[in-house]
Image (cartoon, rainbow, N blue to C red):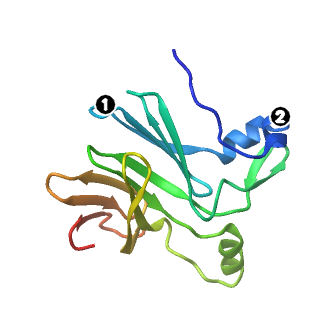
């Protein structure tokens, strides 16, 4: 087994004192494309995408406006206080696609107390170059959690857990 990488946090205190909670807050989704050697890691909380090029050993951290995962420690556990981030990531031959939520836990709790229920999952697909440059942001007509991208056919398949017919098909050209 070969291990590499570190949690790219600026919270040095958390790195020293609450590593299990920090690891929980940085729980991520991962995909690897063996054809181009790109490994992408997208955080479930916050707005962080890490890109490892395993062919040339480079590492890029892309941080959106919501930044790294925010959390409080309670009983040794990391309790999220920031936003729901990514729920899936896929590395294709030409780009990286990631499903993004973006809803804050504060808003989720407030709305739930007021009887407002939001659909589960995210309404956005972010597309990045293999080097991490933002290329496109799709706003969907459904809330999705998982994707499978077929660049050759120009199709994104997605799962919508809020519907009885949960498999959706989007044409990349029309969304």
User: 166 left or right of 4?
Assistant: left
Instruction: Please tell me which residue lies in front, 139 or 109.
Output: 139
Expressed as whole percent of the image width and height from the top left, the position of residue 146 reads: 39, 55
**Residue 160 disc label:** none
Separation of marks 1 and 2 at Cα, in angstroms = 34 Å
Instruction: Please tell me which residue lies in front, 43 or 57.
Output: 57
Up-down relation of residue 82 to residue 21 (above or below): below
Q: How many labels, in total?
A: 2
| Residue at the image point whose x is 66% and y is 77% from the top | 112
Crowd rating for badge 2 (residues with CA inside 10 Å; few <14, some 14–19, many 20+): few
| Residue at the image point whose x is 67% and y is 75% from the top | 107
Q: For residue 97, what is the image quadrant?
A: bottom left
User: 4 left or right of 167?
Assistant: right
| Residue ID for mark 1 | 34
Instruction: Please tell me which residue lies in front, 131 or 9.
Output: 131
Upstream in sequence: badge 1 or badge 2: 2
Expressed as whole percent of the image width and height from the top left, the position of residue 31 reads: 40, 40
Up-down relation of residue 16 to residue 2 (above or below): below
| Residue at the image point whose x is 64% and y is 33% from the top | 6
Crowd rating for badge 1 (residues with CA inside 10 Å; few <14, some 14–19, many 20+): few
Which quadrant would the C terminus be assigned to in this image?
bottom left
User: 97 left or right of 21?
Assistant: left
* Residue 175 visible within the image: yes
Up-down relation of residue 167 to residue 142 (above or below): above
| Residue ID for mark 2 | 16
Expressed as whole percent of the image width and height from the top left, the position of residue 160 reads: 38, 65
Q: Which residue lies furthest to the top in this view?
A: 1
Q: What element carries label 1?
A: loop
Instruction: Please tell me which residue lies in front, 138 or 165.
Output: 138
Up-down relation of residue 110 to residue 66 (above or below): below
């Amino acid at each position: 087994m070969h291990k590499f990488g570190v949690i790219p946090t600026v919270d040095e205190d958390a790195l020293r004192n609450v590593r299990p909670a920090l690891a929980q807050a940085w729980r991520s989704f991962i995909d690897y494309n063996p054809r181009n050697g790109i490994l992408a890691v997208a955080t479930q909380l916050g707005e962080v995408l890490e890109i490892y090029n395993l062919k040339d050993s480079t590492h890029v951290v892309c941080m959106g406006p919501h930044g790294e995962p925010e959390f409080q420690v309670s009983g040794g556990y990391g309790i999220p206080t920031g936003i729901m981030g990514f729920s899936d990531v896929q590395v294709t031959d030409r780009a990286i696609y990631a499903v993004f939520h973006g809803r804050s836990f504060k808003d989720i709790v407030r709305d739930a107390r007021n009887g407002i229920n939001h659909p589960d999952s995210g309404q956005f697909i972010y597309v990045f170059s293999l080097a991490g440059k933002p290329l496109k942001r799709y706003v969907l007509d459904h809330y999705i959690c998982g994707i499978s991208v077929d660049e050759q056919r120009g199709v994104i398949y997605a799962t919508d857990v809020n519907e009885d017919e949960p498999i959706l098909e989007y044409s990349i050209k029309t969304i």
